[in-house]
Amino acid sequence: MTADVVVDWLLTVAADGLRRGPDAVTAGLRAVSAAVPAQRVVDAAVVQVLRAQVDRLWTSGWLPIDLYEVTRRQASALAVHLVVDAMADTAATYPSATTHPRWLAQLGEVGAENWWDSAVPYPAQWADHHGAERSALLEAVVQLVGLALRLPALQVILPPPGQATAGGGQAGSGDSAGGTPTDGGDARGSSAGAAASGRPRPSPEKVLGRVRALLAKAESTPFPEEAEALSAKAQELMSRYSIEQALADAVSPERRTTVASARRIWLDAPYLGPKTLLVAEVGSANHCRTVSSEKLGFVTVLGTDLDLDVVDVLATSLLVQAARAMLATGSQYSRLGTSRTRSFRHSFLLSYATRIGERLRDAADQTAAAAGTDLVPVFADRSLAVDTLFDSLFSTATARRSFSAGNAAGWGAGRSAADRAVLTTERRAVRRSRRP
């Protein structure tokens, strides 16, 4: 029996599992094992079928982080190990020069690396490496293939391996290297602020590193006052840097080309609806647009790279702090002793997200007023770039979803918690005249 035949058999077993359940998978795998005694044939088939599925999903818009996250949520721990190894194996078939830098970074983030002896197909070494039985490999393969077969296509926001240009982009990809430019265009805009102040500005990576460190401390400390101080400092750093860059763009001889990108923020159940609302509120206040894919568990955020960084960092920290504040309220019961915990927490998170949005928009309005007219053309360019990318990726997107809260106590508690979340302190305008 050839590897191609085994591939077809594995696909059939996976499809039967989707229709008929796990018993069909068990029976199918027994039949495969009995009919194909040669392990090398099975190993070759496993490599072939997983490369084909990973390649198909990558071409359909799924990024390495996406495949990792959806497998973590919908499959076993061994399937997660397998998808990481399958992505490492598939990526190695493409020249690195044709793979986008962000794609490579995501592969590194999930730990996709070739740990195996390349002289032998990795499935032959997989069970020992992960401390599993040989039979567990085929079970994970069928589970992963079954998951891949039912996943829908996503919007292509980065060019898949083999399609990235020398600059890391692809026309129409939605990535910053090949996204949607507006009129204008001088890359010198990013350094104009440094020239105006007579000192170099820190890099975005350095600023975000400091912000993440502050937020990590804020999330871990048991003292609310310390958390508020650390959070306020983190927000101040993000706000100052964002406004400095915007002002630098505004005063450059020719404004730099504004490019919009898209990223996905994955969320954990339960209460996905209120959590997507929180991300949407943070995104809206930071000149971004969002689209919820609640059934899969993520939100797509569209904006400039710096705004996306701010939304990612701020929303992630707010989700952590919201969960901590929510859990601190404990279980909730009605007068008759009936549990009201779920409705309380759902309302809590809805209220928290709504109040966070109010505070962020108020702060953004104050920033815009303090900055005067300098930022108007910059933000207009950003808005146009984001809207253009949104229309190209989500032309059939439905209207924004509405939410309802059915627990007044949860709503009040969530609003109070949001008022204590000082991550949303005012955005300080950084005027050129105030620079040393």
Image (tube, rainbow, N blue to C red):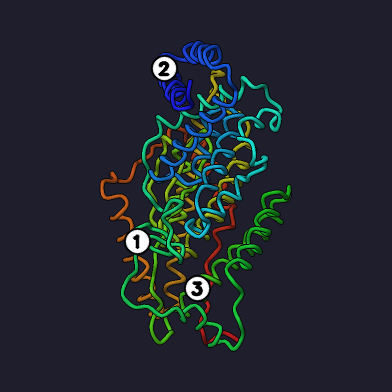
Disc tally is 3
Q: Position of residue 137 (x, y in %)?
A: 60, 25
Who is closer to the viewer here, 4 or 165? 4
Q: Earlier in the sequence, mark 3 or mark 2?
A: 2
Spatial CA distance of label 3 from label 2 is: 56 Å
| Residues marked 1 and 2 touching at CB (< 8 Å) | no
Q: Which mark is residue 243?
A: 3
Tell us which disc is closer to us: 3 or 2. Answer: 2
Q: Which mark is residue 171?
A: 1
- Secondary structure under the numbered disc 2 in the rendered image: helix
| Above or below 346: residue 154 | below
Res 368 → quadrant:
bottom left
In this view, the residue in front, 206 or 30, is 30
Q: Which residue is mark 2?
A: 16
> In the image, what residue type sits under mark 3?
Ile
**What is the crowding at mark 2: few (fewer than 14 residues within 10 Å), some, or many (at least 20)?**
some
Task: Report crowding for label 1: few under 14, some 14 to 19, many 20 or more residues within 10 A (C-alpha).
Answer: some
Q: Is residue 207 above or below residue 129?
A: below
Report x, y in % for residue 281. Answer: 44, 52
Helix, strand or loop at label 3? It is helix
In this view, which residue lies farthest toward the left?
396
User: Which amino acid type is marked by label 2?
Assistant: Asp
Specify the quadrant of the image occupied by residue 36: top right
Can you tell which mark lies on residue 257? Answer: none
Q: Residue furthest right?
A: 222
Depth check, mark 1 against mark 3: the one in front is 1
Closer to the N terminus: mark 1 or mark 2? 2
Vertical side of 300 occupied by 259: above or below:
below
Q: Tell me the residue at 45%/15% (across/down).
A: 21
Q: Is residue 284 visible?
A: no
